[in-house]
Every structure is written in C-alpha cells, then in structure tokens.
Image: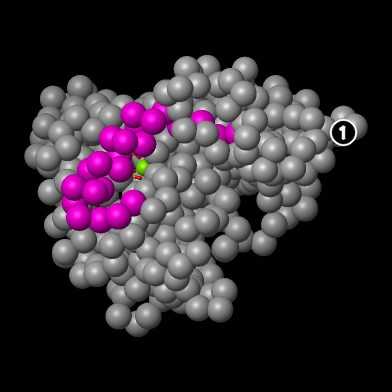
Amino acid sequence: MALGKKDIIGLDIGSKHIKAVQLKANKGSHRLERLGITTLQPELIVDGSILDSTHVVQAIKELIANTDIKAKNATLSVSGHSSVIIKRVSLPQMTEDELDEQIRFEAEQYIPFDIEDVSIDFQMLGPAEEENMMDVLIVAVKKDKINEYVSVVKEAGLTPVVVDVDAFALENIYELNYAVKEGANVALVNIGASMININILKGGISVFTRDSSVGGNLLTEALQREFTVSYANAEKLKQNEPVEGVSREDVKQTLARAYDDIISEVSRSFDYFRDTTSYENIDEIILSGGVASSSDFCNALAERAGIEVNVADPFKNIEVPESFDREYLKKVSPIVTVAVGLALRRVGDK
Ligand SMILES: Nc1ncnc2c1ncn2[C@@H]1O[C@H](COP(=O)(O)OP(=O)(O)OP(=O)(O)O)[C@@H](O)[C@H]1O
Ligand SMILES: [Mg+2]
C-alpha cells in the first residue's frame, strides 16, 4: 500500500506516560529516528478511559513538537479486558474472503459484547487439530474505545492509520529482537501504571493473552497511604529518591508488600494459562513497562514465579545512531517497548 511507505509514528498513550517512536525501515533493517516521552498529570486517563481529552491532546502535541517529529501517520493501541477481547477459535475451513464475510456471525458467540459495538479483525492461524477445521485468532475491540483514542490523536493533528493492541505490539518486539526457542513458552509481560498486558508465546506463536487493570499505581498508592505523602513524593520514593522524614528501609518494606499484589495478578494469569494448556510450564518472562525499571521488582517476580525474568530490550536489533544517549535509552527501554512495537507496524499488516 502507498501509505505503508510513509513514515509512521508509534504512539503509545499510557495513563502515566505518552511515548512516541519513529523508526526508519530499510531493506528489512530498522534505525531509530525519533524517541520522546512525556509524563501525564494523574487522573487524565483512568482505567483506560480518557477523562480529560483537552490535556491529553495538548500533551501529544507538545511531545510531537519537542521530539521534532514531522511524520503525521500514527499507529496507536488500546488494551484492557473491558474493551479488547482476543480469542483463539476453531472454525470450519474456508477462504480468507469467505471468513471476512462471515466473521461477525462467527465471532458473535465468542465475544461477550454486543456485536454492533465492536470492531472485529481476525488472523488465520492454519489447520486445526480437528479435520476440516482451522484455527483463527479473533480480535474484537469496542468501537467507542477506538473512537476515544482516535479522536485525541486526530485533534493533536496526526492521522491514525492503524489501531493495534498492546499485547500484539509486544509480540512485534519479540519477533524483531529475539530468536524463537522451539517448544519454549515465553511470557511477554508489560506492567505500566494501570494495566498489565500478557501475551504468552509457544515456539514464537501467541497462545494466550490477558489484560488486568493493575499496575504501578498500586505502588504509589501504598506509599501514599503508608507515609502520608503526596502523589509526587510517592513517585520519588518509588524511584529511590529521598523524601524528608521517610526512611529508605521502610520504603523498601512497603514496596515489597505492594510488589506482591502485582505479582499475584501476574501469577493468576499464568494459572489460567496453565489451566488451558494441561499445565505447561513457562520458561521465561520478558518484562516491559515502567515497573520493569525496578530491579527489586524483577527479582521478586523471578523468585515468586520461579521463572527467569529478563527486561525487554526493544532496540537489540535496531540501529541506534550515536546522537542518542545510550544510558538514557537503556533506562527508558522498558517504558517505550510498546511504542517501538507500534512503530514497527506498517499499514496493511495483519
Ligand atoms: N524505577 C521504578 N520503580 C518502580 N516503578 C517505576 C519505576 N519507574 C517507573 N515506574 C512506574 O511505572 C509506571 C509507568 O509505566 P508505563 O510508562 O509503562 O505506564 P503507562 O503505559 O503510562 O500506563 P498504562 O498502565 O496506563 O499503560 C508508573 O506506575 C511508574 O511509577
Ligand atoms: Mg502502557
């Protein structure tokens, strides 16, 4: 498609940070062109809903200007169990065109939303175990959620060309940067401020996805409660910065308890995965999102889950020009992982 040749911005609108990434694709390789992050005031986006679109639009405009991004086309993403449903189903074999015509009818029985309220996409995965059947991935996203995000992006002067799902953006990162381990189950886990996205790959193919409405906000709230400090000071404490009257040791203990709550939610998803796969093990966790910046959290997760945890490196196979500060990039890598995954998308991709 003609549009596919144009530069695309990967725009990840999170409740804590908006991230913009632009890559240059050349004969199958990629180079980092632009990267920017801006921090949102709390409560502008709550539970994945944009409550204050004026300020979010403003933040996107400033981010694009400050990052010196000239491109207009943007890939964005939505997530959250209340607006995105991803289902792997077996359907009678048919051609892609036939399925395209029938998908709404087929999807209706698997989607817990009114079929009129969702936008549906699908991907054919290949023959199913049962004869004359094929496996299909159905993705249904609430139209009002898409509209909500599309309108702020348009208002900010950009052109949304693809609306993706966070879990799939993580998969893009894996495909570009990691060698598929045959037979291994790898859990891609993204923990932001208000959301956990999980996509478990078996031999590189997605077999399980789940989003939960839990994230780093739990840590901030625990610190605010425990030490009666402001949101801003709790954020400082979370990142090892000192706050008067609060001891480092007490912070560590409070955080450790709050890490447990986040880890329990991740474990719950892993349990669902095991239930649906006759108790297969997960061999590795590739962790992204702001919470992955905390090595204490990574260690706690590895210990409690009994699984090797590695922080995602979205730039492993992307050329990074000298002009970028390596140290800074390493620090923000987990935060921009979804945005890099979105920047890898091209119009017409499935
Ligand atoms: N060093 C750190 N230790 C612990 N938490 C951290 C650290 N650095 C950032 N965070 C937390 O990570 C979260 C932000 O991560 P991220 O940018 O991935 O979220 P988001 O994408 O904006 O949110 P959403 O969950 O709505 O998608 C915040 O809760 C922030 O406090
Ligand atoms: Mg996020």
Snapshot quadrant of residue 328: bottom left
Q: Position of residue 312 (x, y in %)?
A: 49, 55
Name the residue rendered at 30%, 80% in the picture.
323
Would you identify the image quadrant in which residue 192 lies?
Answer: top left
Q: Which residue is mark 1?
A: 132
Quadrant hosting ligand 1: top left
Q: Nearer the viewer, residue 73 or 257?
A: 73
Q: Count of labels shown?
A: 1
Residue ID at (16%, 64%): 65
Residue 132 seen from this side? yes
Label 1: state its secondary structure. Answer: loop
The amino acid at mark 1 is Asn
Please indicate, yes or no, whether residue 335 appears anywhere in the rendered image: no
Q: Who is closer to the viewer here, 102 or 57?
A: 102
Q: Against 30, is 114 above or below? A: above
Say whether residue 45 is magenta.
no
Relative image position of residue 232 (x, y in whole percent): 13, 39
Magenta stretch: residue 158 in it? yes
In the image, 94: left or right of 53? Answer: right
Residue at x-position 21% and y-position 23%: 226
Measuring from the top left, give residue 82's x and y in whole percent.
42, 23
Q: Is residue 121 left or right of residue 154?
A: right
Identify which residue is drawn at 79% across, 30% down: 92
**Is residue 303 depicted above or below 11 in this figure?**
above
In the image, which residues are magenta? 137-160
